[in-house]
Structure formats: C-alpha cells, structure tokens
Amino acid sequence: MVEEEEEEKEKERRRGEWSKKRRRERRR
C-alpha cells in the first residue's frame, strides 16, 4: 500500500505549512 506512505508524507508537508501559519497567527 503506497497510498498510506504518500498520505504520511503529505501530512508532514501540511504540518510544516500549518506550523508556519500558526506561528504567523501567534504574532497577530
């Protein structure tokens, strides 16, 4: 099942974008 591995990679990529967005919101 390569779909599960792709989902984990996408989750990590989204987490990086979410962390950057959260940091920007905290400075708000």
Image (spheres, rainbow, N blue to C red):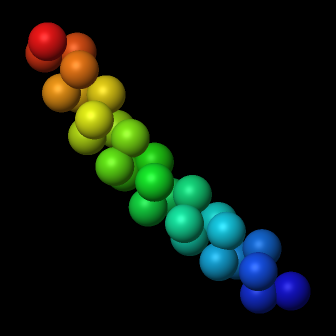
When asked about the image quadrant of residue 27, the answer is top left
Q: Quadrant of the C terminus?
A: top left
Q: Quadrant of the N terminus?
A: bottom right
Give x and y (percent) for residue 26.
22, 15
In this view, the residue farthest toward the bottom is 2
In this view, the residue farthest toward the left is 27
Q: Is residue 5 above or below residue 21?
A: below
Q: Residue at x 65, y 77 (%)?
A: 6
Q: Is residue 19 above or below residue 14?
A: above
23 relative position to 6: left or right: left
1 relative position to 25: left or right: right
Q: Is residue 1 above or below residue 6?
A: below
Give x and y (percent) for residue 17.
34, 49
Q: Residue at x 37, y 51 (%)?
A: 16
22 relative position to 10: left or right: left
The mark tally for this picture is: 0
Give x and y (percent) for residue 23.
23, 27
